[in-house]
Image (spheres, rainbow, N blue to C red):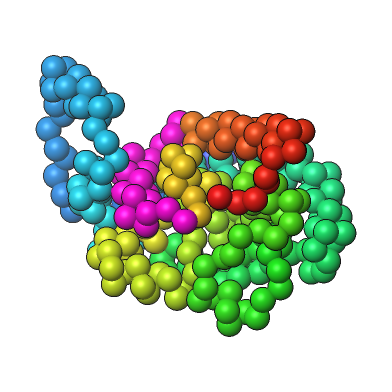
Amino acid sequence: MSFSPVEGVGMLWQLTCTLLGAAVTARAQCNPARTTRHRRARPGPAEARARRHAKHFESPAAFAPAALVVLPPPGRVTGTFAYAVLKRAFDVAIGAMLLIAAAPLMGAIALGIAMALGRPVLFSQQRVGRGGRLFWLCKFRTLERRPIERSEVEWSAAASHPFATLLRRSGLDELPQLVHVLRGEMSLVGPRPERPHFVKVFEQQLPRYAARHHLEPGITGWAQVHGLRGDTSIQRRLEHDLFYLRHWSLGLDVRILLLTLRDVSAALWSLGRRKQCGGDTGVV
């Protein structure tokens, strides 16, 4: 079958219009408020500079109450077009590369856990994801085997083996969660997913806690790179999660990943030095 030049141009024009229409529709679905509100007046150069200056010197706690302003009504999909598309593309690309690069290390860790703690090598636990959806999170097992009923409602105990301590303090036990990133259940960066039992408790104590479920949960996050891991203040973690919610960007994600790499390297170096000096390697 052959087409004349005129017919070919017409088909190309229809295809272009179809693609543009699909992009506009996707953008409107990601941020429906754009279709109903008027565009705000653009601030002048002096006002823009003042806002940028204030942004760099305000603490995450100062942004926490205002962060709720950007949240949509319950049941809506959170995020701009960039969050829905660019962040997902970033997660898939970087997550796939990290998973391939970390595959030999993960094999060595699995072998070490089997020798130190026995089987199973992986630990699975139910967590709350974006929009309140539940999923089963997997990580390397670093604790003694416990019934699932206890692990769902009890805080994790201290690691019982030096190798398990190394994994927990360096964060290497979280490497299997790269699979969740590729499956779309998690992101590389975001609020850490919590167990359903503790989510109900925290929502009663902190009315703003549910706001963090408007984002994809992450392997690492703004709170974690500020030392808020393990037995730390839930209020402080929430403040940092809301700060990330309001100021998300790909640049911020890259910064958090680099800070996480720095923390992992520092933890491994510190534990290695303690082992050489014969110091205690227990979790503190």
Q: Quadrant of residue 258?
A: top right
Q: Quadrant of residue 20?
A: top left
Q: Is residue 3 shown in magenta?
A: no
Of residues 280 and 53, the one nearer the viewer is 280
| x 44%, y 34%: residue | 252
Residue extending furthest toward the top: 46
List x then y, in percent, for residue 240.
35, 46
| x 16%, y 22%: residue | 50
Vertical arrangement, residue 142 with respect to residue 283, above or below: below
List x then y, in percent, for residue 233.
37, 54
Image side of residue 275 versus residue 86, left or right: right
Vertical arrangement, residue 24 with respect to residue 234, above or below: above
| x 74%, y 38%: residue | 278
The answer to whether residue 33 is visible is no
**Dominant SS type (magenta):** helix
| x 55%, y 56%: residue | 186
Of residues 20 and 90, the one nearer the viewer is 90
List x then y, in percent, for residue 52.
24, 24
The residue segment tinted magenta is 231-253
Of residues 52 and 44, the one nearer the viewer is 52
Vertical arrangement, residue 249 with respect to residue 151, above or below: above
List x then y, in percent, for residue 241.
37, 49
